[in-house]
Amino acid sequence: MSMQRTLSIIKPDGVSRGLIGEVVKRLEASDISIVAMKMVHLTQAQAEGFYAVHRERPFFESLTKFMTSGPVVVMVLQGEDVIARYRNLMGATNYEEAAEGTIRRDFATDIEKNVVHGSDAPETAAFEIGYFFNQLEIMS
Ligand code: ATP
Ligand code: MG
């Protein structure tokens, strides 16, 4: 185990459905520290840059359109093993396969509109955090 940071996004469906508080409540209840937070409305180019690893996937265009459909809340989370711990809180990508009590199982409505994003590895976390935040915006 090691101290890690990860990027969390409350996606446009989560923001528009009033789930910001619910997600933050679950983070705090799990002893996951929020060390940066802001709301942004991504442009198409910004969403495409963020999801560049998925450029060849059939769902890329739909995903980037969805991610620009309204504001999102972006957070940097910090803690021991936080990348995996936060992904466990989120649940599987497909909410129908997500474990009971996870955010996606409880709130997602669609494989795409799955309320939250979380980085999947230390390298992607570093890229994704740097995409949204500079050093001065992250609590040390
Ligand atoms: P995220 O990266 O958002 O945390 P994830 O790592 O669980 O989710 P990825 O495989 O990275 O899933 O896919 C990124 C996002 O693309 C998913 O969260 C979902 O919104 C969308 N997505 C993934 N697979 C599909 C699919 N088969 N059809 C439509 N949308 C999909
Ligand atoms: Mg992913």
Image (cartoon, rainbow, N blue to C red):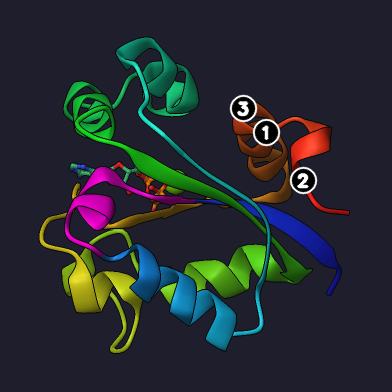
Q: Inspect this view and state whether residue 91 appears.
A: no
Amino acid on which the number 3 mark rests in the picture? Tyr
Let me know if residue 80 is in the magenta part: no
- Amino acid at pointer 2: Ile
Q: Quadrant of residue 1?
A: bottom right
Regarding mark 1 in the picture, which secondary structure is present there?
A: loop
Task: Point out residue 30 in the picture as x, y percentages from the top left corner.
Answer: 58, 85
> What mark, if any, has residue 133 been given in the picture?
1
Q: Quadrant of residue 62?
A: top left
Q: Which residues are magenta?
A: 9-18
Q: Residues within 10 Å of mark 2 (few under 14, many from 20)?
A: some
Label tally = 3
Residue contact at pointers 2 and 1, CB within 8 angstroms: yes
Q: Nearer the viewer, residue 6 or 59?
A: 6
Q: CA distance from mark 2 to mark 1?
A: 7 Å
SS state under label 3: helix
Q: From mark 2 to mark 3, how far is it between C-alphas? A: 13 Å
Query: Residue sitting at 65 percent across and 50 percent down?
Result: 121
Q: Which residue occupies 43% across, 17% down?
A: 46
Residue under numbered circle 2 = 138
Closer to the chain start, of discs 2 and 1, is 1
Apparent side of residue 123 relative to residue 112 in the rendered image (left or right): right
Q: Is mark 3 within 8 Å of ligand 1?
A: no
In the rendered structure, which amino acid carries the disc numbered 1? Phe
Badge 3 crowding class, 10 Å Cα cut-off, few under 14, some 14 to 19, many 20 or more, is few
Q: Residues within 10 Å of mark 1 (few under 14, many from 20)?
A: some
Residue under circle 3?
131
Decide which of tag 2 and tag 3 comes sooner along the chain: 3
